[in-house]
Amino acid sequence: MHPKLVKYLTFPLHEKIIGRKTFEYLKELERLQWTSPAQLDELQFEKLKALLMHAGKNIPFYAKRFSESGFDPAKMQSMEDFKALPFLTKAEIRENLKDMTWSSCPGGLHRYNTGGSSGQPLIFYFDRRRQAYDAAARALTHRWWGIDVGDKELYLWGSPLEITKQDRIKDVRDRLTNQMLLSAFELSAAQLHLYVKKMEKLKPKCLFGYPSSIDLFCRMAKQHGYELNNFGIRVVFSTAEVLYEHQKKNISETFGGVPVANGYGSREGGFISHECPKGAMHVMDPNVIVEYARNSRLVRPNEDGEIVVTHLDNWAMPFIRYRTEDIAQFDDKPCMCGRHFSIMKTIQGRTTDFVVTPDGRWQHALSVIYVVRDIPGVAEFKIIQETIHSIRVLLKVDANLFPKEGRDLIVKGFKKRMGKEVNVTIEMVDEIEKDASGKYRYVVSMVAEKHGFDIGEYF
Ligand SMILES: [Zn+2]
């Protein structure tokens, strides 16, 4: 379908039918991205106060929480008052699901869940307003890269959850909105051929998906001699996982040197930040309040902290000071692009993207990833830290390329980075499974998973 037809007719019609004000919000965000930091602060405070007053009045969980904390939203004077409220954890959401929803929400409650990368799914609800604000944020940030509503877009998606949703109705909807969804969950050589053909036919202007899936797709395509640099793709949008430098480079090269732009968000937390062409990850300040915390205090600029999110537009089930379990820093310097949305940087992913060393250091997963990646012939791998002293490495290798001393190099490399007392076992496997959500995690640390980012509590 012609992009203009989608932009001016089918997409607006779709949003109108389901009751989303996506286009109004997009206009609002277009304006707000250039307003002053002081005006943004003022807007955030107003929206926050309205949300908190609603939560205290209509949502039993928060009514109880506020009264226990001696907090009265109507009397809130500044952000400092808000910061006295406790953080909200995933466990609390699971335990209080019913008491956290607004039963008479206009437009109804829409149920979602996360696949649960640690095996435990999280169930929660959105309203139409949050869906619309997130969709508007997505459209706004795509425009930063020259992609407009209605432009052809290909999703290379790794999640079986999304795929099962792709029923006939969604198929038609995708055609009407110029989107195409391909599953990268189980890529095979036969599928690869089909995908390249589909891509050639659709000629998408942008590609969107998990970096691990897109990277794998690119590597497989290269291996089978496909050229992907002439399909007209202008930009690749990476989401839902940490985008590693090696993936960025490979993806960019495969599509003829196009930019690979990073986005951060989650199903439960919403659309949170996105990279601009000047390289800054701008937070959607009009829609979310983001804080960065460690050991129950807020960190300073350029310090690692857990991302804590308050989505200002989900009145159906407010998440107030929600601990995402992802780690990042923030920058207090302005961006060259002139937008005043605040800046998130060095997103390091989940607390579980770390390994914990016997002497108490939280070492970024990359440090061990690079040990394995440097060995020739390693096709896929997964590193599992089972206890503080034991690491299992699953390896899928190309036997012709993998050197005799490969195993020794890995063991040595790990001991060097984590300590001599760490016991490393290596298992050769034919296949490495993705987790329940379809994401591919290179490193799983059961130690980090168990203890979260409150290092002080563990050591
Ligand atoms: Zn910028």
Image: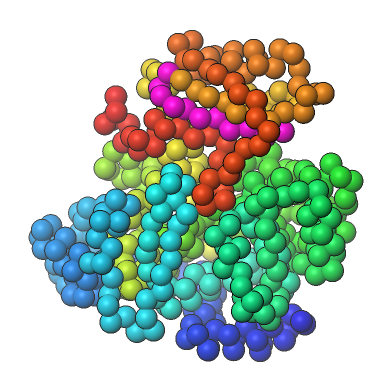
Query: Which of 189 and 379 lies nearest the eye of the viewer?
Result: 189
What range is drawn magenta here? 379-389
The image position of residue 107, as x and y in percent, is 39, 84
Residue name at image x 55 percent, y 41 percent: 441
Residue 290 appears in the picture as rendered: no
Tell which residue pokes out farthest to the top in this image. Answer: 420
Query: Which of 98 and 336 lies nearest the eye of the viewer?
Result: 98
The image position of residue 221, as x and y in percent, is 82, 48
Quarter of the rendering occupied by the N terminus:
bottom right
| Colour option used | rainbow
Asked if residue 387 lies in the magenta stretch, the reply is yes
Please, is residue 179 above or below residue 115 in the view?
below
Q: Magenta-highlighted stretch: main secondary structure?
A: strand
The image position of residue 65, as x and y in percent, is 16, 60
Residue name at image x 68 percent, y 33 percent: 430
Q: How many marks?
A: 0
**Is residue 363 left or right of 108 when viewed as pictured?**
right
Asked if residue 173 lies in the magenta stretch, the reply is no
Please, is residue 367 above or below residue 129 in the view?
above
Quarter of the rendering occupied by the C terminus:
top left
The image position of residue 453, as x and y in percent, is 36, 37
Residue name at image x 78 percent, y 55 percent: 191
Can you tell which quarter of the image residue 125 is in?
A: bottom left
Query: Which of 318 and 256 lies nearest the eye of the viewer?
Result: 318
Can you tell which quarter of the image residue 374 is in?
A: top right
Residue name at image x 20 percent, y 64 percent: 61
**Is residue 210 left or right of 25 when viewed as pictured?**
right
Please, is residue 442 above or below residue 410 in the view?
below
